[in-house]
Image (tube, rainbow, N blue to C red):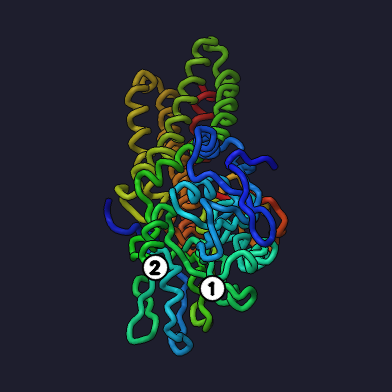
Amino acid sequence: MMGQLIYLKDVVTLELDREACMGCGMCLLVCPHAVLSLTNGKIEIADRDACMECGACARNCPAEALSVRSGVGCAAAVINSKLGRKKSSCCCTIGPEEKPNDPAPCC
Amino acid sequence: MKQPFVMGSIPTPVGPVPEVSPSLVWADRRGGFKARWGMGRMHYTIDPGLYALGKPDEKSPVLVTANYKMSFDRLRQVLPGRDAWILVLDTRGINVWCAAGKGTFGTAELVARVESSGLTRIVSHRELILPQLAGPGVAAHHVKKLSGFKVIYGPIRAEDLPAFLDAGNKATPEMRSKTFTTRERLVLIPIELIQALKAGLIIISILFILAFLGRSEEGWANALGHGFFSALAVLTAILSGAVLTPLLLPWLPGRAFSLKGLIPGFFTAAILLFFGWVHWITGTGRLEMLAWLFLIPAVSAYLAMNFTGASTYTSLSGVKKEMRWALPLEIGAGIAGLILWIGSHFIA
């Protein structure tokens, strides 16, 4: 098997506030694509294009040093949200209009 | 609900906790197989709450998972001979990663489930082992604050849990990376295929009707022949976009999925048109063949683009960027192809 698969370049919305970072390393544990690295007690974005914007790092950063416009990278979900549909048989729907008790199907 | 994997129960300070079997039976595997093919997939659930695996005591680890039965089955079979508590969250039958992305496998549900299960009275430690892919939904520091439990992110794959536990809750870099191997792509193909075929059958029916309307004066057999060729062409496009593209993904050139899908689209279209060479003799036949040269790659590219949803590495920003150029092209090529196809059947 070849190395890690990479999607489009220079699109990712991941941002890091290095001043705020405390170097706790929680983000390193949750990132599924080794996007971040820890050097001299601070986090660095080592492989930006590998980021899939899942949002795990930002969610688990106690210092709120990481931010990303997270979402599901799914074309059908984008189409469904554009069409105003709340459900799809494929994957997930996107958008704040989603009801929490909606038995929305997902991948 | 009656759950066949429950073998009995073990007593705890908060009452009996159901004990689950550490191995899968034929019915579990059949259920998983059916879910992969889209049968009962949205209701493939188990009851949320606390379960016992083996004979856990107050020191045993607590493993957290989703109430999608396939997720739960994966977990309970990878720890033969070990004792653990399994805390199942209510994710409405959705797997861990997707549920975390939607927030149903989230901080609030986790904290509430810890509370309702009486876990604080069952275990003496204050640690929860979560699958790493719960990260998008769970904020570990908030869980600690709200419940007193420390979240430990375990490996991505349940199969790595024994090694993780034996290493003192330490994961290797490999355990922390989400792969997208041939096998992982292969198991996703059935659902892609079923979804595409549902739409494909409707399109095939319409093309059959149009073929009869346009060609009936040339004889029913002729119209039927064109209908069958259309059906074959639609199935070729689906095979290309929903089967070949996922299978060959890492080896197809380009980064955008639409681009990846275009290549098997052209390739399979060329093969089909080669075997349909008899149609090239007439002017309308050539028009019909040209139509498929637009339609098959367009459908294949569209289906490939939809596979971003199942893939493990595409970002929302990337998908939006790809769709901005790919979707208009796919729709444009689709309309061009349809006009050519209808033209070939009606201007004759």
Residue at image coords 49%, 25%: B231
Q: Position of residue B288 (x, y in %)?
A: 45, 27
Q: CA distance from mark 1 to mark 2?
A: 15 Å
As helix, strand or loop, the secondary structure at mark 1 comes to: strand
Foreground pick, B40 / B50: B50
In the rendered structure, the answer to whether residue A54 lies left or right of residue B183 reads right
Label 2 element class: loop
Farthest left residue in view: A2
**Is disc 1 surrounded by few (<14), some (14 to 19) or many (20+) residues within 10 Å?**
some
Farthest residue, direction bottom:
A19
Horizontal and vertical percent for residue B155?
42, 61
Q: Position of residue B300 (x, y in %)?
A: 44, 41
Residue at 36% x, 19% y is B281
Q: Nearer the viewer, residue B201 or B227?
A: B201
Name the chain under label 1: B
User: Where does residue B228 sit, x and y in percent of width and height?
Assistant: 48, 20
Sequence-first disc among 1 and 2: 1
Using the rendered view, name the quadrant where residue A18 is placed: bottom left
Position of B142 with respect to B310 (left or right) is right
Residue depicted at 60% across the width and 73% down the height: B143
Kind of residue sitting beneath label 1 = Lys
Q: Nearer the viewer, residue B258 or B328?
A: B258
Q: Circles 1 and 2: CB distance less than 8 Å? A: no
Q: Are labels 1 and 2 on one chain?
A: yes
> What kind of residue is marked 2?
Gly
Q: Residue at x 45, y 68 (%)?
A: A30
Query: Does residue B98 appear in the picture of this structure?
Result: no
Q: Which residue is mark 1?
A: B150
* Label 2 sits on residue: B168
